[in-house]
Image: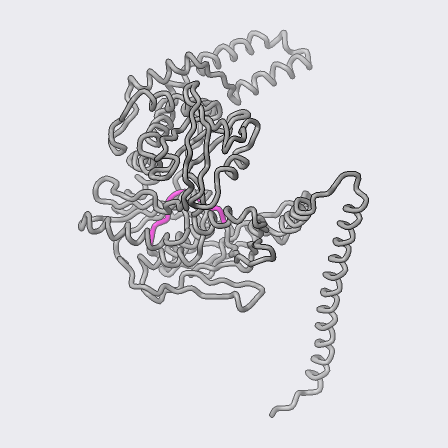
Amino acid sequence: MRRLTLPLAVALACLLPAAAIAQDDRGFEISKNLEIFSNVYKQLNNNYVDDVDPGKTIKVAIDAMLGSLDPYTNYFPESQMEDVRLQLLGEYGGIGSIIMQRGDSVYISEPYEGLPAAEAGLEAGDRIVAVDGQSTRGKTTADVSSAMRGQAGTTVTLRLERGGKEFERTLTRRAIKMPNVPYYGYVQGDYGYIYLDEFTTDAAKNVREAFVKLKEGNPGMKGCILDLRGNGGGLMNEAVDIVNIWVPRGTLVVETRGKVASKNSKSFTHNQPEDTEMPLAVLIDGQSASASEIVSGSLQDLDRAVIVGQRSFGKGLVQNILPMPYNSQMKVTVSKYFIPSGRCIQAIDYSHRDEQGRAVKVPDSLKTAFTTKGGRTVYDGFGIEPDVEVEPEYMSNIAMALVQKFLVFDYATLYHRSHLSIAPAAEFEVSDSLYDDFCRFLDKRGLDYSTVTERVAKELREVARQEKYDSAIDLHLKAIEAALKKEKADDLHKHSDEVRDMLKAELLTRYYYNKGRIEGAMKSDPVVLRAIEEMSR
């Protein structure tokens, strides 16, 4: 056996005690601060003027502690386990409906197709008056949602109001599992389209089945679009298996690295692919995160797909669910993930904070260049940058007002109650007569909103008054205000395409649910059309 040299032996002799001391110091600091925390709570409990709720107070303390790390490390008490199931599995016990708040009331916003709410005849626009005899007045959507959820097989009685008349429905809760692929079909006949909503259990299986059916339905299919816009991610193994649909077995998709070596891993594809040659486009935007970025980023690194849309969110962190006492759980960030080129796309550095305590973005100076399989340059540290960028469309002032005041929603509610059907989703368009009827509805309801230009003009008038310039420029300001009023009166005409799209989406959702909304939007979606253009080159 080789003997240690004297200098090395001395260095190790110095290093080992130092490491032990550092570990002892860390252990002491943990013990000391836990003791301090325990005593702070005891003193509060014994001396505070009012009774202290232990569960609520400790939960606030835990949330504050975890909040100092990153927004993805969370603690879930037993009462929130339904939320955990929804996040991981897309599943919960309930009636299957989206609800929304308007003032101090809660309304049905969208019942899901084929689930208890829809089967019981609940409609968008129904006001929820009471749940199991308890009034919902003044309650939040979280309060009402919690009351309606429960174990599958149990019942819940809702009192609702529709068109001024109240009625009751007793519904049997079901294990509600949201479809992670709510729609797939064809665009322009020869291009497949798959919309993936979440990376929950069986997401890869459902995407694979959709792709196979699309190919079987059209053997001459020229390309496929995977739409990950708005998809916040989910299970990493599902992301790996989705990539596997289009890349060979044995391909590295993602690697995780963290403090605990046992949690580090490399994930390779392990199935036979369905197609490694067909043109593929992946759509992303600023809400595409985590598993969405693994799929889009790895397919970009492997030069297997063209990425179209806007830069993704930039979440390169991996969480594990850890069991805690009393049926609670904690979701903890345990590692970062790296896609095939070797880059990590995490955009926010939670280990560094600015003077206001906010986490900072990775600076441009620290971003590193990597290369794809084919030699193209890509960068880390700021999400997935699309190969083909399509500028996002921003809502006009009038569109925002229509949404905020629920005017499109209310018109669709009235229309649905007086019209039994509309054209199929792929064919339906907002006709001129329907749009005119909507404009008349707005005239009766009144549509008041302010634009940025109006607000600036108002501020200018106030500043001019303070600086005593108002009399000198009053005529000019009046002319500006009159011109703005005239232009604003024409907003429904200038922005008719945007407003028609909003009306179309809302009406399609009423008659054909979420599937119909997606199908109806595809043929005029600029990102979808650009993806087809790229694949047809």
> Where residue 337 sits in the image (x, y, percent)?
49, 59
Q: Is residue 77 above or below residue 272?
A: above
Residue at left offset 51%, top offset 9%:
479
Classify residue 443 as left or right of residue 478.
Answer: left
> Where residue 169 sits in the image (x, y, percent)?
41, 31
Q: Is residue 53 above or below residue 3?
A: above
504 or 304, nearer to the observer:
504
Q: Is residue 277 above or below residue 518?
A: below
Q: Is residue 363 in sight in this rendering?
A: no
Q: Is residue 406 in sight in this rendering?
A: yes
Secondary structure mostly taken by the magenta-highlighted segment of the chain: loop
Residue at left offset 48%, top offset 22%:
405
Residue stretch in magenta: 305-314
> Where residue 116 sits in the image (x, y, percent)?
38, 38
Colouring method of the image: one colour
Q: Quadrant of the N terminus?
A: bottom right
> Where residue 358 sits in the image (x, y, percent)?
63, 45
Residue furthest to the left in view is 219
Classify residue 392 as left or right of residue 191.
Answer: right
58 or 159, nearer to the observer:
159
Residue furthest to the bottom in view is 1
Residue at left offset 37%, top offset 47%:
180
**Magenta span has 261?**
no
Count of picture labels: 0
Q: Is residue 2 above or below residue 423?
A: below
Classify residue 122 as left or right of residue 454.
Answer: left
Classify residue 333 as left or right of residue 228.
Answer: right
125 or 223, nearer to the observer:
125
Quarter of the view holding residue 163 = top left
